[in-house]
Image (cartoon, grey):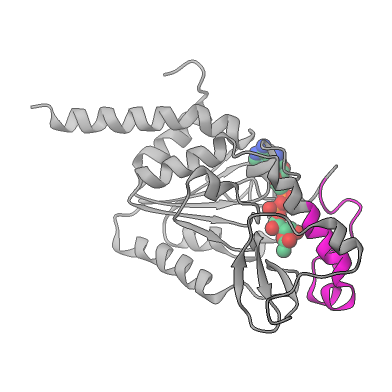
Amino acid sequence: MNPQINSEEQQLIDLMDSARRVFVFCGAGVSAESGVPTFRGMGGLWEGHRVEDVATPEAFQRDPVTVWRFYAARQAGLMGVLPNPAHQVLAAMERHYPAFLLVSQNVDNLHERAGSHRLVKLHGSLMETRCTAHGTVTTIDAPVPLPTLERGELPRCPEGGLLRPNVVWFGEWLDPDHLARIEQFLQAAEREPPGSLLLLSIGTSGQVSGGYGFLELVTALGGHTVEVNPEPTPFSKVVDLALRSPAGELLERVWPQVVQQRLQCVVAQKEP
Ligand code: OAD
């Protein structure tokens, strides 16, 4: 065994080696090593902001300038950050496993920039706007300028419709197409050998995502469940394996071992 790998990490490597259908569920912790603040805890985004003032449809109706200032600042924050090894390994995993789905609550664009495609952005995207009049979603490549917002000028579509950030706010429904895609991906495990399905929950506190029920569904389908988070969460007691490490640091170390182990297995199968 590699001396840099402890026994829990080896268990993760073995699970990743034997998995045939991999479902990764991410939260803000995945982007923490890129310097993007998480939501909860010290220095988190919700410190100094009341959720109901910046992340609800009512707040936007009441005071769209304040809401836009909050999101424009977060858009600007994305300009100076880069994907970290966690994003990169997740993109590499997608190329490795034929059945793979990455579901992220993160509204930053770091998964896409690392090369992930089989990606569901469950809470929307910071770099997209949605027209409140026409519903049109548009990708933007620069932050909404703060000085125009300071003057009280709000972003509008060419026909004058008010644009909002294309993110899911508290009190709003998740996109049913996203939920259908996730369910279809997970249910396919029923037609596969037991234990083929693996869920990795990475960098989420479970405060919001605990209600989504993905972990329970994977368990009911006979899959394995793993959490990666430096802090304990409500998921920690119910997963098969909980690793207390920063995601980038851990994935960067274990992923080459998974690839090596899988290659050795292929070679062993081919030898007469
Ligand atoms: P949270 O801020 O609630 O939780 C972030 C988690 O990441 C915490 O459990 C940290 O311990 C963990 N963490 C920190 N650094 C880490 C690292 N380097 N590697 C791995 N984990 C690390 O963020 P989310 O769970 O994503 O919703 O929050 C879910 C949703 O609630 C967000 O999408 C947002 C928020 O309010 C909306 O805005 C609708």
> So how many labels did they put on this image?
0
Residue at 35 percent of width and 51 percent of height: 196
Q: Find residue 34 and report its image quarter.
A: top right
Q: Quadrant of the N terminus?
A: top left
Rendered view: 244 above or below 48:
above
Residue at 89 percent of width and 73 percent of height: 63
List x then y, in percent, for residue 42: 85, 42
Rendered view: 233 above or below 85:
below
List x then y, in percent, for residue 113: 54, 46
List x then y, in percent, for residue 192: 29, 58
Examine the structure image and report whether residue 187 is included in the region drawn in magenta. Answer: no
Q: Classify residue 57 as left or right of residue 222.
A: right
Q: Quadrant of the C terminus?
A: top left
Examine the structure image and report whether residue 65 is included in the region drawn in magenta. Answer: yes
Residue at 48 percent of width and 49 percent of height: 116
Extent of the magenta region: 44-73
Magenta region, mostly helix, strand or loop? helix
Q: Find residue 247 and report its image quarter.
A: top right
Q: Classify residue 95 as left or right of residue 157.
A: left
For this orientation, the residue located farthest to the front is 158
Mark yes or no: residue 232 visible.
no
Mark yes or no: residue 60 visible.
yes
For this orientation, the residue located farthest to the top is 3
Q: Nearer the viewer, residue 30 or 258?
A: 30
Residue at 63 percent of width and 64 percent of height: 124
Q: Find residue 175 and report its image quarter.
A: bottom right
Q: Classify residue 207 as left or right of residue 89.
A: right
Rendered view: 261 above or below 133:
above
List x then y, in percent, for residue 255: 45, 32
